[in-house]
Image (cartoon, grey):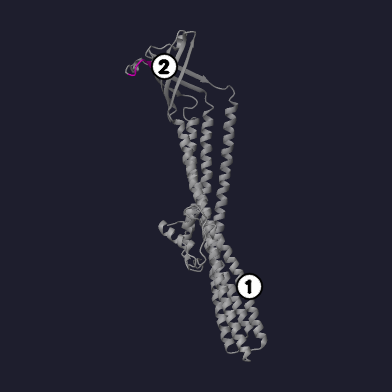
Amino acid sequence: MRLKLLIVAFGLIFTAQAQEMLTYQEYMIWVREYHPVARQADVTLRFGDQELLAARGGFDPVAFMDINAKRFRDTDYYDRRTAGVTVPTWGGVELKAIGEQNRGVFLNPEYRTPESGLLALGASVNIGQGLFIDRRRAALRQAQIYRDATRAERELILNDLYLDATDIYWQWAADYNNLEVLREGLRLAEMRFEMVRESFIQGDFPAIDTVEAYTQVMDRQYRFQQAEINFFQSTQMVNTFLWDANEDPAELAAGVFPENVLDPVVFDYNVSSLREYVASHPELQLTDFDIATLEVERRFRAEMLKPVLKVDYNFLTTSINELPETSSFFVNDYKWGLTIATPLFLRRERGNLGFTKARLDYKNYQRDLKFVQLRNKLENEIFNFETVEQQLVTFTNNVTGLQRLLDGEMMRFEIGESSLFLVNAREVSLFQAQQTLNDLAAKRKTAYAKMLNAAGLGFDPQ
């Protein structure tokens, strides 16, 4: 499909006098592949991936080394060397492996180690604040939610782009059909003027009929020129949606034209399904992701109400091959610590938790309102689409009736029972009705796209 698209795009852009149709399907695939907004939508996924990568960095092992030495007047006061690795885990336990090698005349006895150094292997565990969730785990979970949110945001951006592109394409198609209608009207007026003028020369028609025929030519020429302006403007709007693989703006060749806006189309949709889809609209998904992010924040803020209760244990050895038995962990060669702390009033913690809860309530109310708005918008678009369909059927019958009236008037004119004025009036009514029909057909196809967009759906390139 992409190869076909490239071939078609090359021909439509660079063939100077091409008479080539750009179908709606080809146009939309072109927009999806190369439009800057479509590429921006794809970039949003990278935002989520990189945010998640950064959050996962909170669980990266950290290697460190610290060297402090002092020598003064030929005396080694101290030489302290510490190196190790800490490994954070999802369960909130931080594993540690630390090696020390310290010496010196004035070294604090607390830091003395064997000549070969001392190895400490252990862990730090939060059994109070941070047991179930901490800032590191909260950040990772929020990054995962954000990554999912970028997918919904991408879908929302693409759906809006598809709707705008669809609206422009079918307006272009309607303007092209209107141009052809007025081109035919101008041709008929010019032919009739030549016929009337010839009849006047032969004495069959009065001079006033030539004036009547000529004014019709001028009027239709003006309307045709206006249609040319409209078609040129809509073509330029279509060009704004066309870009090439090198990210440069593309332009259609002069002879490229759209599908016939009156071609029959099967609209495959189910109203009940659309009403179900709106419950998972990308806008609602984004709000749900905001709520999920705030829920993670609420859990973290609630965790901050607990006192800090941290246990740190390390067993000591001079060699990795001399690990103690499990039963001797608290008998010899170990160091451990216990940290307990808590604010007396918890005003900051309670304030942060209350603020997060208020934001959560606010976002839930916003979500409820957004759902009602999207549901009502969908109902409006469904009604609008179905109404336009009925209007199209009605006006199709109207055009058929006007064509019959024109045919009858032409027969009467040919046998001398009608006038040029009545023929022109019938013809003008028919041409105006055909233009209205073209506009209605374009409006119906755009209304279908709006209905899908309101349900949270977009263009399917398949």
The secondary element bearing badge 1 is classed as helix
**Picture coordinates of residue 336, whole percent (x, y):** 43, 16
The label shown at residue 2 is none
* Mark 1 nearby-residue class (10 Å; few <14, some 14–19, many ≥20): some
Residue 88: which quarter of the image? top left
The label shown at residue 222 is 1
Disc nearer the start of the sequence (2/1): 2
Identify the residue at image location x=55%, y=80%: 404
Q: Is residue 283 above or below residue 268?
A: above
Q: Is residue 389 above or below residue 460?
A: below
Identify the residue at image location x=61%, y=86%: 196
Q: Is residue 373 left or right of residue 28?
A: right
Name the kind of residue labelled 2 in the image: Glu
Start-end of magenta stretch: 314-320
> Marks 2/1: CA distance?
94 Å
Query: Does the residue at mark 2 contact the one at mark 1 (Cβ under 8 Å)?
Result: no
Q: Is residue 345 visible?
A: yes
Q: Is residue 398 visible?
A: no
| Extreme residue in the right direction | 208
Residue labelled with disc 2: 100
Identify the residue at image location x=55%, y=78%: 403
